[in-house]
Amino acid sequence: MRSLLLGSKRPSRLVCWCVFSVVVFLLVSLAAVAQKPKTNPLAPKNETPKSETASTGPEQNAKPVHELTQTDLEAFLDGMVPLQLAREDIAGVVIAVVKEGKPFFAKGYGYSDVEKKIRVSPDATLFRPGSISKLFNWTGIMQQVELGKLDLDRDVNDYLDFKIPSTYPKPITLRDIMTHTPGFEETVQELFVPDASDLTPLDQYVKAHLPIRIFPPHTTPAYSNYATTLAGYILQRVSGEPFDEYVEHHIFQPLKMSHSTVHQPLPDALKPLMSNGYDVASEPAKPFEFVEAAPAGSSSITAADMQHFMIAHLQDGRYEGTQILRPETAQLMHSRQFANLPDLNGMALGFYEETRNGHRIIGHAGDTQYFHSDLHLILDAGIGFFISYNSAGKGEISAREAVWHAFLDRYFPYDPPPIPVQTSAAADARLVSGRYMISRRSETTILKVLTVLGESKVSSNPDGTITLDSLKELDGQPKKLQEIGPLMFRAVQEQDRVGFKYDQSGRLVLVTDFPVFVFQRSPWNENSSLHLPLIVSAIVVLVLTLLLWPVGAVLRRHYGQPLNLTPQQRRLRLMVRLACLFDLLFLSGLAVFFTLSEKDIGILSPRFNPLLRTIQIVGWLGVLGTLAALYNAFHSWREQGRWFWSKPADTLIALACFAFMWFVFTWNMLHWSLRY
C-alpha cells in the first residue's frame, strides 16, 4: 500500500535497510491484497481477461490433428497434469469431460489428503467449485421463470420483504442480476466465516449486507456475489423452500447428483469424501471453508456429478429421461443478454461467453481461498469440460487456464487471422494509454483503497502497439496488442482481445473478453500514477523524521550541541513527531489487517471491527497531528534564530502529513461505517 526510502551518511546502510524493509512490507502486502483474485473469492480473477476472441465462425477452424478419444485425452493429460502439480506445488486436481450427451472422461490426479496419501477420485472426492455454484442458483431461477413465479424484467423489490433504495430511475431486475449489471458496489464482509456457528440465515445476510448502488442497472457490469445471494433469497421466497433444500430437490436429485450438496456444514455421509484444501501441497491442510453468501458459492461436488449437470445444459435441460428446463428456457439461458462491445464476449443468463479457437463457449469460473475451478461448455461441439484444483499453488501461471487452452489447441486447433495494418494504430495507442480502475470495486467503504492499489495500466509502445499490465504471457511479461479496428486490439500472434469505448459521460472504458466487469479511465484525483508516488514520498519523509529523531539526539550529545528550544517549541516538536508515528502506525495497521485477511478471509467480519476502529483512531490522531505540523512549519519560517535548514525540513514534514491526510480521505480509509 505504501513505500518508503532514503538514508543519510554514516548510518546510511542501516537506516536505508530499515526503511526499505518497511517499504517493501507495506507496499507488497497491500498490493497483493488488491490484485489477487483470492482477495475476493467466489469470483473470476480480476487481473487477467479469461477468454480470448470473439467468434470468427467455425469455418476458420483447421481440421483437428488429434481426434478427441478417451485414450488420446488420457495420454495427453497424463503427460501434462502430474508435471504441473509438481511444478506448482498443488496437492490434487480433478478433470471431467462430457461428449455427445454422455460422460466421456473423468480422472483425478494427486491427493485429496496429502498427509494420509488419499488420492483424488472423480466420483468419490468432493471439491468446492466456488462460483460455479452460481449456475445451480441460476438454473433454479429459470425453473421458477418457467412456472410463471418470476419475471426476469420485473422490479426485484416485488419479490422481497425489504426494499432496495431507488438510487436510479430504473429498478434492478433479475436479468440485471444474472448479467452482473445491477450496479452494486463490491462488498466482502462475511462473505466467508470461520465456523459453521457463524453462519446466519439467508434473509439476515441479504438485509445486513445490502451494498450501495454505484451504477445505473444494465449499463456497467460489476461482478457481484451479493446480487447472486439476493437472487438465491428470491428463489427461496417464491418457491417456499430453503435455498439449499430447493437445489437438492430440483437440481441435484433429478440429475442423480448423489454426491453433491450446498449444505454447510457437510452432511455426515459426505464428510469423509471431502478433499482438503491447501495453499500449497507442501504446507498443512486448511480447514473447511464456510461461505456465508451461500447461493454465491457454497456447493461441494464430485466431478462425476458435475458431468450430469454439464450434460443437462448441453442437451437443452435434459439428462437421461429427466427435463430440468424446457429446451426454449435452456436456450434463452445460454443466449447473449448483455455485451459491452458487440465484437467481444458478453453475458448470457448466469453463464458468460468465453469464445476461443473459433467456437462460442459459455461457462463460469470459481474460486474459494483454496479451491480453483473452471467449467466450459462448447455448445456447437457438445463438449463440456470441468477442472478443479484443491490448492492455490505457487501461482506462477494459471494452472487451470493452461490445461484448458492446451485441450482446445490439441482438439480444436486454430490460427488467428492476420492483423491488417491500421493507419490509426499509433494515435489510438496514445489515446487509450493511462490508468484504469475496475468497475467491480468499492466506492463508499474502507475497501476503496484497494482500487488505487489495483489499477490497470495501458501503455503505448513505439511500434504502435499497446500493453495492458494485467494481460500477461506465461513468463509473466505483459502481452503486446495490435490494433485490428477502431479502438479494438488483439494480442500479437494470439487471441486475447480488448476494446475501448466511451460511456455516457464521455469517459473512456477498457473492455476485455471477460465480460463480468470493465475498466474505467481513472480521473486525475483518483489516479495511482499520482497517489502512489505521493504516499510513497510522504512515508519516506515520515520514516526519516522518526529515524533521524534519535539519531539527531545522539549526534547533538556527542558533539555537545544542545537543542535550544523553548518549552512550547519542544512540545510542538514532540507533537509533530507523534503525528508522524501515528500516521505510520495507521498505515502499518491496515497493511497487517488486509495481509492477514489474505491468509484467512474470515477476518473480514464485524468481530474484528473493534480492531479496525482502534486502527482508525490512531489514524485520526495522525490527521489531527497534521494541524500541529502545519502550525510548526508556519512558525518555523517566522521565528528568528532558527537554523536555516530546519525551515525546509519542517515544511517537508508538514507536506508529508498533509499528503497522508489527502490520501486517507480520498480513499475512505477513515470512513465511519465499518460495513464493507
Image (spheres, helix red, strand yellow):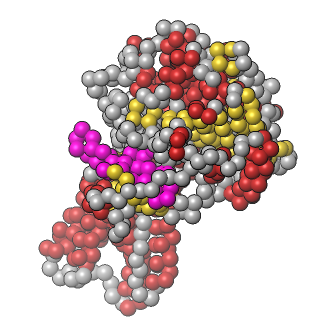
Q: Is residue 509 left or right of residue 123?
A: left
20 above or below 48?
below
Q: Position of residue 243 (x, y in %)?
A: 59, 19
Q: Is residue 200 shown to the viewer in this render? A: no
**For the magenta stretch, what is the residue range?**
486-514
Q: Is residue 271 left or right of residue 435?
A: right
Q: Position of residue 520 (x, y in %)?
A: 33, 47
Q: From the image, which quarter does the C terminus lie in?
A: top left
Q: Nearer the viewer, residue 127 or 348?
A: 348
Residue at the image point whose x is 58% and y is 33% from the top = 380
Please give the name of the residue rendered at 45% of the width and 33% of the height, measured from the top-left corner: 347
| Figure quadrant of the N terminus | bottom left
Q: Is residue 445 magenta?
A: no
**Point 38% across, 81% down: residue:** 552
582 vs 491, nearest the viewer: 491
- Relative placement, left or right, of 440 versus 595 is left
In reply to whether residue 495 is colored magenta, the answer given is: yes
